[in-house]
Image (cartoon, rainbow, N blue to C red):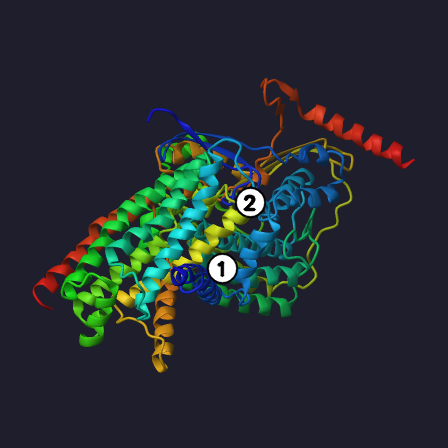
Amino acid sequence: MALHLFYFFVFPGLLFAAVAGGFLSWFDRKITAWVQFRRGPVLLQPFYDVMKLLLVKETIVPASGSVATFLSAPVLGMSGAAISAVLVILPAFGITSGFRGDIIVIFYLLTIPSLSYIIGALASSNPLAAVGASREIKLLIGFELTLLLIFAAVILKSQMSISLYSIIAFQQESGALIGSIPGVLLFIALVFCIQAKLGLVPFDIAEAETELSEGAFIEFSGPPYAMIKVTKYMMLLVMPVLAGALLLGGLSFSGLSALWSVLKILGVVLLLTLIRNTNPRVKVGQAMRFFFLWMNALVIVAIVLIYFGL
Amino acid sequence: MSEKKIIPVGPYHPLQEEPELFKLYCEGEIVRDIKWETGYNHRGIEKLSEQKTFDQVFFLVERICGICSTSHPFAFANAMEEIAEIEVPDRAKYIRTIIAELERLHSHLLWVGLAGHFLGYNTVFMWAWKYREPVLDLFEMITGNRNSYAMFKIGGVRRDITSAQIKEIEKVMQTVKRKTGLLAGAVMDDPVIHARTRGVGVLTKQDIVDYAAVGPTARASGVDIDIRRDDPYAAYGLVNWKVITAEAGDVFAKAEVRLLEMYESISIIEQCLEKMKKENEGNTEVRVREIPEGVGSGRAEAPRGEVFHFVVTDGSNSPVRHKIRAPSYVNIATFKKACVGQTIADATISLAAVDPCYCCTERMAVAYDFKSREKIHNGYDLLRISQEKTEKIRIIKQ
């Protein structure tokens, strides 16, 4: 029990994921700044941001709307992100714990942060937040199917192993999945899914600063907004680690391979950052068409290739 | 869903930095109707102008708009010179043209950056503004200011451009041309930008005529109007250039027109500099002693369209009546055509596509009581309240 609490709150859950995700967020912002001829933030800036929201800023609650739901949504999102961090990061680093969650559970847990954004936005009874929430729902419908198909393809490829441990074990025996043609196709689709999951340009449709002034998050302030920020940091760690575990052959903490693992995660984040800096925001209809038509087709091609043993 | 929901854009909104309010009446994400309110910052420029001397009015009208701060003095100078029947020296004409075209360059670069930002493409935003910086540095070199240059006076310009400065301007123009090409390539060839801007916010030729829109907004819909060619002033009749038009009328066409206009501006500046080298240095003004009684109108093509100034004088040293029409005031009326029937995402970029400048649109403000919706203050009331408050402060001070 104590160990599980440790997993959830300290490593690799809440604390570790938030700190590591904060540094990844700094990495993302620094690269963005370099691309845009700016100097960029100092190393601790993501944490200053959170501390300011936690300690200095007051919590403003909308006059109309459900206060309890509004305030509990960020807590829900943060716990969802923390528990998915535990279930993704532990197997990815090869640490055995009591619970061996399979990737179907992970798929559902990863949806919780998005759901919490929607719940919080709808509870705030702000028209801009309502539009943001409806966009987030549409986006979710768009990319979740692709993500599920990617999981199915990975399961198929790794000889029907359904837990993250055995998928990694399979890859360590017979090479990382990205080494094959379907693996590359799956990786492309997965990167776009992560982009949508993290709400980065071109899929920052739910926030859309210049259209909806942060849309779903418009009413959040102070500590609740700090929680949303922490949730985003954690997701910025969890999704690249998941990509590493599913397709890049897993991660490891021992010796030189620890460096290699960090490079894998940074590489995925770098890819996300570059995509978000070289594209404008798309419309929600365009995003849905992109996932339904092109990304699903891509993954289905990959599945067919896997079926025929490529 | 038949109930229409109001999505407010403004008065404080990241889309536009200036105070304005657009109410988008939406069904789901589709904009069914649009209403707008401007006038949050009415300053009474026309009235102020009647209390200033002609020399002071230049500084006043320069402050109508921060971005196109030369087009208003330009139009005012044209109006005054029509009244006084002054022929400006050629060198002054070239300098005026160079300043106006440099302004168009920096204004269009600013818009390209902002349009990128509105689409969530912040890299374009930062790059365009970086490339705009040398142009502002040129302004600082020539006039001492990055904005609000105070270059114009009746009968000429206040400062000359020396031959050393001409060399520097030519050098910077080469860089700007190269960088603009880079930027234009990145914007015009990006398939995602095409997907976001083609067929969005379309204004037909008839819409432009109906709403009397001007400038790049009109030219992007195939309406071939440009004051610089239709009613040549300063040196525009003395150099070779062409008016850029496009047919599509969508956001992409507006971007295209602005990007290509920047090349024309660079070409005009280079030709003016070439011709200036043959002129005598220092011959930049004619002395004006008296402004006779009369009526004059002046026009200038600002980056956003036609600026119109109408001045009545009575032989004294200040205008009796000064009427100003700024381009954004007519251009934002086209939103009714451009935005209705689009999604919110398309409507916001359509709002930005005419490059609206809200300080150009400020008109009289009327305050309503929030609950009873009764009119409580008009402009004169607000003025009276403000004066009463000043009196109160005075009494306390004594």
The label shown at residue B126 is: 1
Q: Determine whether the residue tagged by mark 1 lies in a helix, strand or loop.
A: helix
Q: Does residue A77 appear left or right of residue A45 in this picture?
A: left
Quadrant housing the C terminus of chain B: top right
Q: Determine whether the residue tagged by mark 2 lies in a helix, strand or loop.
A: loop
Q: Residue A230: x and y, percent?
A: 47, 55
- Label 1 environment density (alpha carbons within 10 Å; few <14, some 14–19, many ≥20): many
- Label 2 environment density (alpha carbons within 10 Å; few <14, some 14–19, many ≥20): few
Give the quadrant of residue B34. top left
Of all residues, the one furthest to the right in this rendering is B398
Looking at the rendered structure, the number of numbered marks drawn on it comes to: 2
Pick whichever, A56 or B168, lies toward us: A56
Of all residues, the one furthest to the front in this rendering is A1
The label shown at residue B242 is: none
Q: Residue B1: x and y, percent?
A: 32, 27
Label 1 marks which chain's residue? Answer: B
Label 2 marks which chain's residue? Answer: B
Q: Does residue A207 appear left or right of residue B227 in this picture?
A: left
Amino acid type for the residue under numbered disc 2: Glu
Of all residues, the one furthest to the left in this rendering is A308
Q: CA distance from mark 2 to mark 1?
A: 17 Å
Q: Residue A90: x and y, percent?
A: 33, 66
Q: Is residue B137 above or below residue B311?
A: below
Identify residue for label 2.
B17
Q: Residue B161: x and y, percent?
A: 65, 62
Residue at the location (60% across, 31% down)? B363
Asked whether the beta carbons under mark 2 and mark 1 sit within 8 Å of each other, the answer is: no
Amino acid type for the residue under numbered disc 1: Met
Residue at the location (49% across, 34% down)? B22
Residue A280 seen in the current view: no
Pick whichever, A160 or B235, lies toward us: A160
